[in-house]
Each structure stands twice: as C-alpha cells, then as structure tokens.
Image: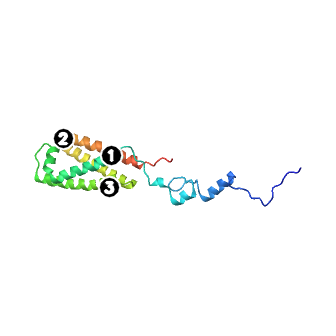
Amino acid sequence: MSAKQDSPLLKKHSQSDLVSRLKSRRILGVGVKDADGEFHRSKISQMLGNEFKFDFHEPFGLRHWQFISALAFSAIGILALAFPRTLHGWLFQEEHSRSCAMNLRFHGGALLSISLILWHAVYTTEKAVVRWALLAQTCYFAVGFLVVLITSVDQDAIPQDAAVLLSGFGLFGIFSLFYYIQVGRKPKKI
C-alpha cells in the first residue's frame, strides 16, 4: 500500500490554521492598540467604536450626592432671593444692612443658576456633563472656603459661625472633588 497523497485541488482551511488567523487579524488591524489606547476584539467593534468610551464608572453614592447638592443649592438660592435678612441672621448672628441683602440676593441668583446645572446632571448619563457639574460645584466650594478664610484672617479672629462655614465648604468641596476624580477614571474592561 502506498501512502495517499493530497490532491493539488484540495484547499487548505485557513480557519483551522492558527498562524494564518493571526496574520489575517494583523492585516485587518484587529487586536492592535488604537489612538485611545483600546484594543478592539473584532473589526466591527473597531469600525463602530467601543461603547465603553461613553459609559462612565459611577461611584457608589454619586446620584445621591448629586441630588442632595442640587436640592441644597436650590433651597439656599431661593432662601437668599426671598428672605435674605433671615438667611443672614441664621448664618451670622449680627446686624445686616441693605447692601448685605442685595449681595445675598445676587448670591442666591448665582446659586439658583448653579442648581440648574446640577439638576440637569442628576438625570443625565453623559460623563462630560456630570464631570462639569461636579467641577462647578467643587470650584464654588473652593471659592467660598477662600472668601470666608480671607475675611476671617482680615478680622484677626475666626468666629464660630465662620468656622462652621469653613468646615462645611471644606467638607463639601472634598466630596465634590472626590466624585469628580472618580467619574474621570477609565472603566475596567470586562
């Protein structure tokens, strides 16, 4: 019996040949790192894009923090617009002037404007909108902290009401910064 020879008409099955598959994937650009630093597993995902780019890592408690912040900004803004003298009396146990009421009303308008951004961020899933809202919130708390600190240093003493404001601005600023950083992290690939 002689050994059976393969006919020259028989084709080689490239699906079963590992080296051939790897060469094909390399030619197509599949499995190669793209400009965003991601590896595509198929040509279709490479052409359509990766949906993970648009999803974001939502840290625990983010939506609760956004809701509480939007509610607080809205409530304080409305109080500052409608009842500036009462709000001033609650924050600072001292007499107030007409210019103080006008300043608090301006501040209330600014808080209501920020609260509109925060309310929009509560109900969106877009990473950029959520990050910008958290950044605006962080900047507000940082500026508020600096204003109270500089005003207290100018008076050569930090009264109890200023200390409460400083701790509040500092704590809320740290929370907002924490969530801003956490939302900016790249998600883990599954």
User: Residue 182, percent across and down?
Assistant: 40, 46
Left or right for 3, reference 111:
right
Is tag 3's residue or tag 1's residue first in the polypeptide sequence?
1
In this view, the residue in front, 157 or 78, is 78
Image disc number at residue 175: none
Q: Amino acid at mark 2?
A: Asp
- In the picture of the structure, the residue carrying the numbered disc 3 is 120
Distance CA(mark 2)–CA(mark 1) = 27 Å
- Distance in Å between CA atoms under marks 3 and 2: 32 Å
Q: Residue at x 38, y 55 (%)?
A: 128
Please report the residue visible at 13 percent of the width from the left and 48 percent of the height from the top. Answer: 86
Q: Considering depth in this image, is 63 or 182 the residue closer to the camera?
A: 63
In this view of the protein, can residue 142 be seen by the observer? no
**Is disc 2 surrounded by few (<14), some (14 to 19) or many (20+) residues within 10 Å?**
few
* Residue positioned most to the right: 1
Q: Nearer the viewer, residue 152 or 161?
A: 161
In this view, the mark in front (3 or 2): 3
Q: Quickly name the residue at label 2.
A: 161
Q: Amino acid at mark 3?
A: His
* For marks 2 and 1 on the same chain, the one whose residue lies earlier in the sequence: 1
134 vs 5, nearest the viewer? 5
Q: Residue 6: x, y in percent?
A: 81, 55
Callout 2: SS: helix
Q: Position of residue 50 (x, y in %)?
A: 50, 55
Sequence order check: which comes first, mark 3 or mark 2?
A: 3
